[in-house]
Amino acid sequence: MGHLTLIDDSLAPRKAVLDSLLAWFFVIIWGSGFVATKVALQYTTPLVFLSIRYGLGIVCLLALALVVPLRWPRDRREWFHVIVAGLLVHALNLGGSHYAQYLGLSAGTVALILAAQPLLTACIAALWMKERLIPRQWLGIALGLGGVTLVVWHKIDRHAMTEGSLIAVCLSLFGTTLGALYQRTFCSRVDLRSASLIQFGASLTVLLPAALLVEGWHVRWTWALIGASAFLVIGASILALNAFHLLMRRGEATRVASLIYLTPVIAVLLEYLLFDVIPTGPSLAGMGVVCAGVALVAFRKARPRAP
């Protein structure tokens, strides 16, 4: 037993470094997705764009499957859980957030509302997943939400808050929260690559008929649309989302979900670098508050080594 403990202790620093790299990769790519989505929606409609996105994702993953064999779900029940998680995370979450912007809700407002995910995650994890949150973590969650409010407050356009857009973004919030927890609970052992392929197929099956029925097929093909689609498919839907689920498997749900607070910060920084939009004083203050909140939620005291 002592030998096994020493092996675990020796691997702990590597695990911590890998988790940190995965976390920052997720934050940067997911935050950049706000900019890429904004670009893509200039040339098509939300459900059509998501249909293109998932169709491209299926092609990429099928090509990967020719090189690296995939491990498929073991039985019908596991297939069912993978599909349900995919419809929540991909169809409901992204469909709602894209439509909220399409209906006029600003990107800042969408980011602010979706940043409430750690609050919902914390409540669900505490009530039903036996996770205990100490006061410091609750304080961190509150600080994170307050910091996000400061970051995006200057972008909020209250005139754009129509009933439809608010319903759409709230559906997105519940989709991403429940989907992440559902996948962690019921799909913890599935191959993330095969799960992504199944979930893309399920989402495309639902969204494509809805796109044709509600929106028609209106696409203005440009290199900007193609580039944004490729970035969101490979970077966000495949690599970043799988990194997020891998982190969910390796740590507490609330700690991982707190990373969502950093994505609006990345969006503001990219907006400054790409469009020369200088952050306001409240934005800079909010970034500091966000980082402090995430640190409170994510920080863990080092465990003493076994003798």
Image (cartoon, grey):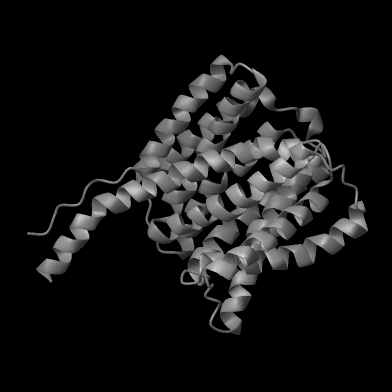
Residue in the image at 82% along x and 52% along y = 48
Q: Where, quadrant-wise, is the C terminus in this rendering?
A: bottom left
Toward the viewer: 51 or 80? 51
Q: In the figure, 49 relative to 192: above or below?
A: above
Q: In the figure, 266 relative to 234: above or below?
A: above
Left or right of 202, for residue 209: right
Residue in the image at 43% along x and 48% along y = 22
Residue 280 seen by the camera = yes
Residue 166 seen by the camera = no
Left or right of 136, for residue 304: left
Q: Position of residue 119 (x, y in %)?
A: 52, 47
Total marks drawn? 0
Q: Position of residue 275 (x, y in %)?
A: 67, 21
- Taking the view exactly as shown, the residue that stands out farthest to the left is 307
Toward the viewer: 301 or 31? 31
Q: In the figure, 71 relative to 98: above or below?
A: below
Residue 293: quadrant of the picture = top left
Toward the viewer: 96 or 72? 72
Left or right of 166, for residue 257: left
Residue in the image at 73% along x and 36% along y = 38
Toward the viewer: 215 or 167? 215
- Taking the view exactly as shown, the residue that stands out farthest to the bottom is 75
Q: Position of residue 170 (x, y in %)?
A: 69, 48
Residue 88: quadrant of the picture = bottom right
Residue in the image at 81% along x and 41% along y = 102
Q: Position of residue 178 (x, y in %)?
A: 59, 59
Q: Where, quadrant-wise, is the N terminus in this rendering?
A: bottom left
